[in-house]
Amino acid sequence: MGHRSGEPHASATPRLGPDIMRQLSLLTGFLRAAFAVRVLRYALVGGCAALLQVCLLTLFIELADMNAVVASTLALSISVMVNYSLQHRVTFRSKSKHTVAAPRFVVLALCTLAANAVLFNSLLAVLPYIAAQIVTLGAIFPVNYYLNRTLTFRI
């Protein structure tokens, strides 16, 4: 309500004009698009590392006759090294120094190794090893993305 003079009360809540609302909408759209692009890059880079991991897993089991959980852990350990380099450069385009980001990535990778071993081992009871590994990777992906984005590369 306004005064008799037509001026709004000092206590009246200001309203955002259409220009500000449009700018906020554009900003929100831009942020969503940037997030989607980063997630897509993370998925592509992580997908390459996952493909490497599944190929190594298969080689270790079929050619080296390794225990499946040991083979999975070793394959993940190797693919993590490739993954770090690509995630740092391609996905997050991080300006974090390797002396800062790499130790954080290693801690996260060790947690991932443990989660991978536990989940993969439990899935082996009901799935073939390649399917168990793919399901495991899918379960770990969103957690790893979030932790890498917020802790490792601090975006």
Image (cartoon, rainbow, N blue to C red):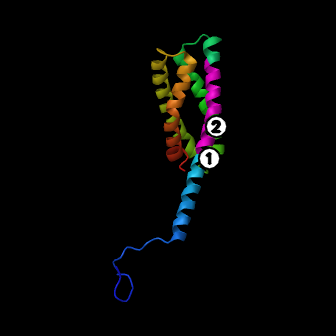
Residue drawn at point x = 50 percent, y = 45 percent: 151
Question: Would you identify the image quadrant in which residue 58 lies?
Answer: top right
Q: Nearer the viewer, mark 1 or mark 2?
A: 1
In the rendered structure, find residue 45 and report the number of the disc placed on it.
2
Density class for disc 2 (Cα within 10 Å; few <14, some 14-19, many ≥20) is many
Q: Position of residue 22 (x, y in %)?
A: 55, 65
Q: Height in image: 37 above or below 63?
A: below
Position above or below: 36 against 111:
below
Q: Which mark is residue 37?
A: 1
Q: What residue do we see at 49% from left, 31% from top?
A: 139
Is 41 included in the stretch rendered in magenta? yes
The quarter of the image holding the N terminus is bottom left
Three-letter code for the amino acid on which mark 2 is drawn? Val
**Which segment is the magenta one?**
38-57
> Residue 7 in the image: x percent, y percent?
39, 85
Q: Position of residue 106 (x, y in %)?
A: 53, 36
Disc 1 marks which amino acid?
A: Val
Q: Secondary structure at mark 1?
A: helix
Along the line of sight, which residue is nearer the eye, 77 or 19? 19
Which of the 4 image quadrants contains residue 15?
bottom left
Which tag, 1 or 2, sits closer to the chain's start? 1
Name the residue rendered at 53%, 30% in the picture.
138
Q: Which mark is residue 48?
A: none
Label 2: element kind: helix
Q: What is the C-alpha distance between the residues marked 1 and 2?
A: 12 Å
> Magenta span: helix, strand or loop, mainly?
helix
Residue 99, percent from left and from top? 58, 44
Q: Residue at 53% of width from left, 63% of height from top?
A: 24
